[in-house]
Image: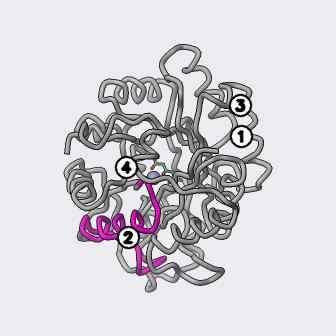
Amino acid sequence: MEKLIITAALTGNITLPTQTPYLPLTPEQIADEAVRAANAGAASIHVHGRDPKTGRPTTDPEVYREIATRIKERTDAIVCITTGGTMYMTAEERVRVVPALKPEVATFNMGSINFSIHPITERYKDEDYKYPWEKEFAESTREFIFRNTFADIEHFCKTMQENDTKPEHEVYDVGHLYNMNYYVRKGLIRLPMWMQFVTGILGGIGSDLENIMFMKQTADRLFGAKNFQWSVIGCGYPAEFNVATLSIMMGGHARVGFEDNIFIEKGVLAKSNAELVEKVVRIAKELGRDIATPDEARSILGLKGKDKVNY
Ligand code: KMH
Ligand code: ZN
């Protein structure tokens, strides 16, 4: 088995500041969390930007530039920039960060799904929210279709290839593997691939362990096991650690972080993303799996290197 690549997804675009006081919001806080997570064993940092004043998700490339620059100055970790965007953006707007920063890795979402966090609003009273935008933001996802049409996918393929950015293919359901297969056959998606099975989003596949096994078997059948590296994102607690443990045993990689889960134990908030990384490191050590450094992860994934980015 390859060494384990741990990704830390520090803040995301679906976790509300009201849910945890430890969510990093400003570029400085996000970079501080990146350093902690990297020191704990994360080889890759998945970056979303937030408006520093309101904590609301943003895709302003300049916010991303500041975050990525601060992380680059202080760690060797790979920076994987989101192209998931926010619900008000077109595919063109979401991917504009790739030509702007030319990152080593960027996310590439492999199909359209309903994507909702509206059940969060059942947990809070109006006066509980930390910021005025949060309730309406969560509530509006009842109507949200996370749009990744075939035309969008073709635009993402082209943009990532032009900028030598490795796609991190996010797979929210088995059908997304067949979307990928279509573009592998057409030569628009190149092998070897880097993919993540995302479970537990309301609108996508659930976190049952059988689903991970089925997605891995399907990917093996379509692409051949040697033609991809894979990781898992289990949304919520304990899904994050359950699917990570299975992946560690099966030779896959793992992502943790406040974007996906805010708990270190049942009902106990993690105080830093680093605590979540440390827990996965402990599980991996118990199971005899070594942890990849950033440079080892670069070599496993075939990345262009930290010196070839535009920030
Ligand atoms: N929020 C995660 C479920 C992206 O940023 O493009 C998936 C994600 C996708 O991280
Ligand atoms: Zn993300």
Tell me which colouring the rendered structure shows.
one colour
Residue name at image x 26 percent, y 53 percent? 68
CB under 8 Å between discs 2 and 4: no
CB under 8 Å between discs 3 and 2: no
144 relative to 155, above or below: below
Between the residue at mark 4 and the residue at mark 3, the CA separation in whole angstroms equals 26 Å
CB under 8 Å between discs 2 and 1: no
Where residue 72 appears, as percent x and y from the top left, is: 25, 54
Where residue 135 appears, as percent x and y from the top left, is: 45, 70
CB under 8 Å between discs 1 and 3: no
- Disc 1 residue crowd, few under 14, some 14–19, many 20+, Cα 10 Å: some
Q: In this orientation, which residue lies closer to the viewer: 153 or 215?
A: 215
Mark found first going from the N terminus, 2 or 1: 2
Residue 24 placement, left or right of 8? left
284 relative to 94, above or below: below
Where residue 25 appears, as percent x and y from the top left, is: 32, 69
- Looking at numbered disc 2 in the image, what kind of residue is underneath it? Arg
Q: Does the magenta stretch include residue 45?
A: no
Residue that badge 1 annotates: 215
Residue 216 placement, left or right of 119? right
Between the residue at mark 2 and the residue at mark 4, the CA separation in whole angstroms equals 14 Å
Q: Please tell me the numbered disc located at residue 220.
A: 3
Which label lies toward us, 1 or 4?
Answer: 4
Highlighted magenta segment, given as a residue range = 18-44
Between the residue at mark 1 and the residue at mark 4, the CA separation in whole angstroms equals 26 Å
Circle 3: element type = helix
Residue that badge 4 annotates: 78
- Looking at numbered disc 3 in the image, what kind of residue is underneath it? Asp
Residue name at image x 59 percent, y 50 percent? 253
